[in-house]
Amino acid sequence: MASSDTITLRVNGAEHHLTTDGSRTLLSVLRTELGLTGTKYGCGTGHCGACTVLLDNEPVRSCALPVSAVGRSMVTTIEGLARPDGTLHLVQQAFVDEQAFQCGYCTPGAVLEAVALLRRTANPSVSAIKEAMAGHLCRCATYPRIIRAVQAAARKMAG
Amino acid sequence: MDESTTEKAGGLTRREFLGLTGGLLVSFSLPGAARRAYADEGESEDLNAWLHLGPDNRVTVFTGKVDMGQGTTTAFAQLAAEELTLPLAAVTMVMGEPDRVPYDEGTWGSMSMRDVGVRLRAAAAAAREALAEMAAERWGVAREAVVVKEGRVSLAADPTKSLTLGELTGGKRIERKLEGEPKLLPVEQHRIVGKPTPQLMSRDIVTGKQKFVGDLRPPDMLYGARLYPPCYGARLTSVDSSAAEKAPGTVKVVMDGEFVGVIGASQEAVAEGICQLKATWEEPEHPSMETLWDDFRRNPGNPRTASEEGSVEKALASGAHTFTATYRAPYVAHAPLEPHVALVHVKGKEATVYAAAQTPFPHRDEVAEALGFDPKNVHVFVPRVGGGFGGKAQCDVALVAARLSRAVERPVLVAQTRAEEFTWNYFKPAALIDIRSAVDESGQIIAWDCDIYNCGNRGAVPPYDLPNHRVRCFPCHSPLRQGAWRGLAGLYTTFAIESHMDELARATGQNPIAFRLRHAQGDKRLARTIQAVADAYGWPPKEKRPGLGIGVACAPDAGSYVAEIAEVEVGRETLRVKRVVVAHESGLVINPDGITNQIQGGIIMGLGPTLREEIRYERGRLLTNSFASYRIPTIHDTPEFKTVLVPNPDYPPKGAGEPALFPVAALVANAVFDATGVRVRELPLSGIGV
């Protein structure tokens, strides 16, 4: 904890200059330094997916990523997904429409994983959806709805 | 209804907190155990939730229940809006906030709808009727001459004479106590109840705006953690805190008997501080899991009889065929995605507590007791809880935060790590269940003798016609800390009962649906639910191919009934639940989409202990302390679902958070038998090596 580094972090389109220990996790820095608490701690070991954010277009486990490793990549958190006018991203809207959550704690991570999946694959099969979402634990077990939400968002994106 | 005024003797002190300036306040009671007196606050003991209609035609419902994702915020609002003929958006829910809501012992047992929901619906109906009567009186007509629609009361003969419900209160404070059974709106007139309704906070959930306790950031907030022992039952013999105190992020090390905690500037600082504590412990002998079943039998304690009828011993002796079987199921964890977390700010003789908790009132009382404060000066708030499943009923983490905050008089957030979450909270009790039974020549069960060790009695009494039966529960001594888990013992007692029913059906050559129906003559709702699942599935199964097994199981719980049929695929080393057909009857359905979410989520959660989940321990150390070593269901475990909500709309709403989970273990075990001829009587089934 002793060291302090000067770090430039690009998050949700904005640039932040921080003085902090570069070995801290991206999760911790997002939640405490930037107040972006939509990204959740679930396990601290990359097993549950609750802390997922996008690094450019790649989903990463922010609980297992030192903030110094982010570099010039743009971090997208759940707070940066909707349009500035409040219009929800299609995946967010699909999660609402399908009610793909109960308690909602794991939802931000799952939504971002689904966004990344749909950027890679326009029309994923059910097994591709399961493969992509398998690292997102939902103890309320809303999995059937998560599958439906991803399918619905894919359909909307295809227009 | 009783009419009373706020000026009555004793006053309504806590209600003054509500800041309600006028309008109609209806208080209503809950039956049985949920009652509790707050005599010193001038409340009668049976006032357990409040409904307020303001002059602006807005409704506020006050209840001590909390929403952990069951969707009760939304369902309560639906009930209130429906009976008051108002839109859903007119309702504000105030939940789990002891300063502003009447006493509630906790959110568990699928009680929210069947207790509070039922009374809330009646209270809203009573409010509507009272206002209709006031309007009739004002206009000098009979009640029948006015109509209530869209939040307004109008004269039927002259619709220009019309006032909103709120306007009718005239800004006065009117208090009513719900008594008797007010007239409910006919189900056919429902606009909101019975319609799929998204959770009210959906937008906040998908945008990350929804605050959980760990997301709160009051000014001056610090972080805290406690030092946990290396194993169960270890006693602290010494601790050297000098290095921890010197660590750069440490604010304070708090030592109080066996309690040692670190307060720091960040979560990382606190973790580092805990690491730097040099503690020595005395580790007691602690049994390993291998001896668990023997230990239960060796020291069962005095049994309590859950139910007894006829003469079991005589009937067993006279049976044409008798059966004996033992079923076992391990300790399992709740594993909510949000680990236990509390934020406490102690200031002078007052404390503010934010807790991810199923028990706001016990939190108030226990924190008050620990700090020596008046409970009135402990203000508890429960924002959304990130999953509870019975695991967030205890106050441990809030008590840690309270002790730490008292030492610095600043807000202290204590958030358990995943390993702490897995290790130091209580588990669902392990179960050892013996059943002895007998059938007559015709294959009718004539004796059922069941001894249940350690796990308690929920779901222990079979719902069937059993003229001679005895069900006993032995308390045992649990080597691990144990407590409530979604449905309490239900998953395990139903595993034993419904596996055994399957064994009897198979042994006597009867099909599992017909066998259950034959023994469900005394319970029409049960029989109807079993028939509903059979019809939905298309029973009897047409297809019989190797590796495919079809299982049946059912259960009553929380005033509801559930019956399930599963198709599983068994390979050399794989066991997959492909499809589940479920029929669920829980009286009036308030939110069909919400209840379906609960049913399917409950079934998938039930697959965890059925297939894989098991707390493993050795000499007091838990070997399962991460999602890698304790594997909960993932999206790969999701079966295909067909879900039937068996209609019974004239029956009051019953519980739906837990029942669907009860049959799951038996359901899969029965399907495994169907596929392989192997009867597995021990969970999890992954150990079977089929």
Image (cartoon, helix red, strand yellow):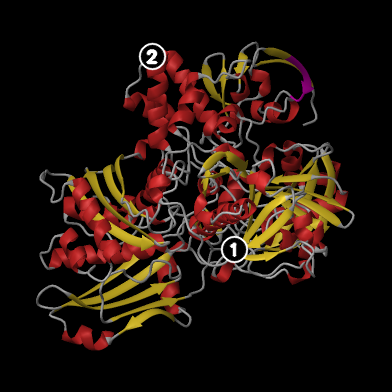
Q: Secondary structure at mark 2?
A: loop
State whether residue B241 appears in this view: no
Relative depth, front residue between A26 and A4: A26
The relative height of residue B309 versus residue B275 in the rendered view (above or below) is below
Q: Which residues are magenta?
A: A16-21
Label 1 Cα crowd, 10 Å radius (few <14 / some 14-19 / many 20+): many
Q: Which residue is mark 2?
A: A122
- Picture coordinates of residue B78 (x, y %)? 51, 45
The relative height of residue B137 versus residue A20 in the rendered view (above or below) is below
Q: Residue at x 51, y 36 (%)?
A: A48
Q: Are marks 2 and 1 in contact (CB under 8 Å)?
A: no
The relative height of residue B313 versus residue B264 in the rendered view (above or below) is below
Amino acid of disc 2: Ala
Magenta residue check for A17: yes
Is residue B375 toward the left or the right of residue B435 in the image? Answer: right
Relative depth, front residue between A13 and B515: B515
- Picture coordinates of residue B530 (x, y %)? 24, 57
